[in-house]
Amino acid sequence: MDDKAWGIRIEDLSGGYGGRLILEHFTAAMPGGSITAILGESGCGKTTLLRMLLGLTPATAGSIFIGGRDTTHMAPRQFHKLRRRFGVLFQDGALISALTLAENTELPLMEHTRLPRKVLREAALRTLELVGLRKFADFYPGELSGGMRKRAGLARAIVTEPPVLFCDEPTSGLDPITAAQMDQLLLDMKSCYPQMTIVVVTHDLDSMVRIADEVLVLKDKKAVFSGRKDELQRSADPYIRSLLDRRFEESRRMAAPPLDESVRNALSAWLDA
């Protein structure tokens, strides 16, 4: 989308754990400046792909290009330097319980810069303001709700204004209203940083519909779809259709009354007796 943004290209990638291939001859693209959602059933390789993008799980074949750099064939020291430019929102927030939100948010800057403490504090407060948590800057993670901890994790992930932000299940464990708020926050981040490339691993189809520009669907060790969200929604592929139809079926189940009217009336009469 944005020529100056860091796109991600995956070419013929294979890898896994303990001799077991999780991804095999995997090819996909995530355009720079876009929000790409990675979808798939449990065990399909979403987490493995994220770990490979972050350099935590080595590839056995193929290449990953991030911002035009081949990270799979990069010397460890070079990749460590490149990884400083990544922001990561972990599934559980991964905040340090003994530090306040401001101190947690300062950590990436403390690790990679020698800025004065006052400047670190100001940067943390500005970033916490972006996620609506400035007034909680001196609270500890244990004093906050799960949704607030995720927002604090997002603040820490973006405090360095990274060109690439990786998000692992950002709406997992959240109620529908809080999940929608988290999605809106990611969209707000995208508005603040239009060149930022955001990669979201998720099982939440509603979240995908709300935030994604691009979608990557994993199945049987490969990408069965890689492209625009509107193209995904028009796809006639049986697996894609079953994946999308499941979302609407779940919505219908949630919207449908749990009891038949006659059963409800009988139950009401019994309770009032």
Image (cartoon, helix red, strand yellow):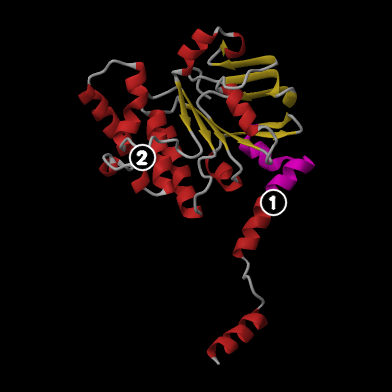
Type of the residue with mark 2: Val
Which x, y percent locates residue 147?
43, 47
Does the segment drawn in magenta span residue 243?
yes
- Which residue occupies the foreground of this view, 221 or 144? 144
For the question of whether residue 236 can be seen, the reply is: no
Q: Quadrant of residue 271?
A: bottom right
Q: Residue, x 58% and y 21% (percent of image)?
A: 8
Q: Which residues are magenta?
A: 227-244
Relative height, residue 140 to residue 1 (above, below): below
Can residue 101 be seen here?
yes
| Tally of marks | 2
Q: Earlier in the sequence, mark 1 or mark 2?
A: 2
Secondary structure of the residue carrying numbered label 1: helix
Residue linked to disc 1: 246
Determine whether, in the image, residue 63 is placed left or right of residue 120: right
- The span from disc 1 to disc 2 (Cα, nearest Å) is 32 Å
Give the residue drawn at x 44%, y 19%.
85
Q: Nearer the viewer, residue 113 or 257?
A: 113
- Residue 235 relative to residue 210: left or right: right
Label 1 environment density (alpha carbons within 10 Å; few <14, some 14–19, many ≥20): few
Dominant SS type (magenta): helix
The answer to whether 237 appears left or right of 271 in the picture is right
Percent of width and height locating residue 224: 73, 32
- Where does the image place residue 185, in percent across and percent down from the top left? 42, 41
View extreme (bottom): residue: 273
Neighbour tally class for label 2: few under 14, some 14-19, many 20 plus, Cα within 10 Å? many
Q: Quadrant of residue 62?
A: top right
SS label for mark 2: loop
Residue hosting label 2: 131
Question: Residue pushed farthest right?
Answer: 238
Q: Position of residue 256 (x, y in %)?
A: 63, 67
